Image (cartoon, grey):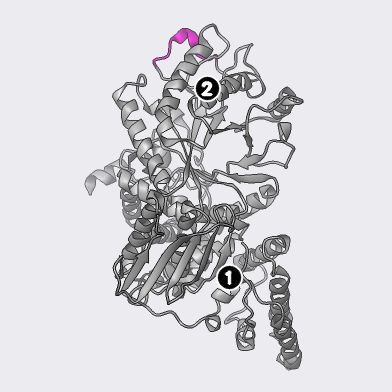
Amino acid sequence: MTAVSIPKRLPICNVFCASFPARPIPADSPERRQATGTAKLKQENTMTHPTNDLARFHTLALGLINAYFRPRMRALPLVLFTLFLAHAHGQNNPLPQTDLAQNPASESKPKTVQTIRLLLPERAGAVADNIGKVFARQIQQRCDAKVVTQEGAPLTVEFALAEGIGADGYRIEDRPGGGVRIVGSEERALLYGVGKFLRSSRYDQGGFTPGAWRGQSVPQKPVRGIYFAVHFHNFYHDAPVEEVEQYVEELGLWGFNTLGFWYDMRHAGEGFNAPEATALRARLERIGMAAKRVGMDTALLVIANESYPSAPKELWAKGGTRGDNCPWNICPSVPGGMDYLLKVLGEEFDWASAMRPAYVISWPYDSGGCGCADCRPWGSNGFLKSSERIAMLARQKLPGAKFVLSTWLFDKAELKGFDEALAGKQPWFDYVMSEGGAPRPMPGGVPQIGFPEISMHNTFPWGGFGATPLTWFSQGRWNQAKKTVQGGFPYSEGKFEDITKAAFSQFYWDDRPAAETVREYIAFEFSPEVVEDVAQVIATLEKNHHMRWWPGELAGVKLLHNWFPSRGAKPQADPGAEEAYATVKRVDAKLTPQARQSWRWRQLYLRALLDAELKANGGAPNDECNNAFAELIKMYSAENANPTVRPPLPADYQKAQ
């Protein structure tokens, strides 16, 4: 993030107060571990903020005071001397604008209003107009204020466009004559500026209280994608499409610039013109066009040998799959196989052209693959042959789309063979998608993007227990990958990983530590007044994230391929679960009606309830748990979902309600 320098000093009283927290933080606590990771990450990020030297100076000074001097009050003179040095250093070295904006003494106190006037650029296009609608809807859903376009409102928010900021960058500044101006480098950059302004504002003081953050921000990573797995009758597959469209907009506010999805032919009947296929494509197009309306790009994922179940059996692949197995996938090496495959994908590309995908991602396994003698090893042989022809087809039918090769589920031999097969050749692809493992050079020097898994890690069913924050885990994965990737597409099965999505959006934007994003998320979605309490709850939920299993109804759930990864998992200690549940009950009473009833709060509340009740009941659900499962099923539109993505409510209990 590029900071705008404003020559204001940090008030010494604020520094002094900040150096004495209300309670000590134990050295082995989750908060201490998270704070330590944040400090390390800030030390690495010296190129992001021109004034990071000062920020580290203050952080170091305050850290020394907290760790060593607070227990020793007789050292107060030394404390004051240290503070004097920090204050004097700040006279000629202003703080980053983000720090100033969070300091109440650096700005006059904003006034809470009931009406906001929105001004669009003079020659606003459809994207700016749609972003204005998103802005109005967000405010009106969160508080009792309304957005208008006529004069007379006590607050004016103006959208503007300007060159010279940087790709996708924005600037938030005071507007001459009063109000706030959000300036974008292009129309879609307004979406990101609006998101920052909304997140810095308040909705819990009887109306809308505009945020005081001022500054300029430009993203570091060009590929800031999110992948929706539209299958298994999960939220993306079965929820009212208007809810999914709105969720796309909300993720765009966090900084994502591309929505990825897969036209999963397992859910498309017997062919392109089957009713199931037509319905699925219509849904995907609605979701994709929601992204396009606010300026986001789309990405189309294809399996490199995918087809419909009606494909001629003589063309079927000969085993060799990993992950899910679709026997009707095509062997590209048999006579007629490649032509049939290109015909099927050509129909798909013709349909997708209306969304103008920015990326086509070719996928090897889960559910692709072929194990015949001419295709194996699939990842470094048949997959590459098929993908090269698909790339040619994509460039013909989807001009301008970048072609991406995924290495999902490759083994070590395939990775080596992949590099050898492509060595010394002119790359016919634009990116390699790779996740995990040690960084390595990409063939032809092409850039790398990630595919972080945020839905399935160490839990089952996915989303079965409500909110699934994985911010510590994701921070570790990001720290490994951030120097080599140009962004990525976190894999999402639904809304339950919403907090982790926010963390990745800010990793991609400016390498922001997850701990900071969590705090901003809480302040925005719930209230600045509950940040400390809810941050501790989230830390506890992450610490107690693990597989759960109980005999009886759960054991009898029939899954696709009879696969149940949590089978036999033993109950764990889940320390702090009772305290976390008590905290969310206390916080619940403090929230506005809008925040209290929001799905983001309810899924977090229910996760804390489930952790505490399962612990108290020896790891098995009681009526409180089953009521929570029933609420989550309704929240996620999972009534008909595959058990892999359905909260584990017994079928007979559901019928009894």
Segment colored magenta: 310-318
Give left or right: position of 583 versus 407: left
**Disc number lying in front (1 or 2):** 2
Q: Secondary structure at mark 2?
A: helix
Q: Residues within 10 Å of mark 2 (few under 14, many from 20)?
A: some
Residue 270, quarter of picture:
top left
Relative image position of residue 468 (x, y in whole percent): 48, 53
Q: CA distance from mark 1 to mark 2?
A: 46 Å
Residue highlighted by disc 2: 393
Q: Is residue 347 magenta?
A: no
Front residue of 608 and 260: 260
Residue under the point 63% across and 63% down: 2
**Is residue 590 among what the camera can see?**
no
Residue under the point 34% across and 69% down: 117
Q: Amino acid at mark 2?
A: Leu
Relative image position of residue 349 (x, y in whole percent): 45, 26
Q: Is residue 435 above or below residue 361?
A: below
Q: Amino acid at mark 1?
A: Thr
Residue occupying the far front of the picture = 122
Residue under the point 49% across and 10% down: 315
Residue highlighted by disc 1: 98
Front residue of 13 and 357: 357
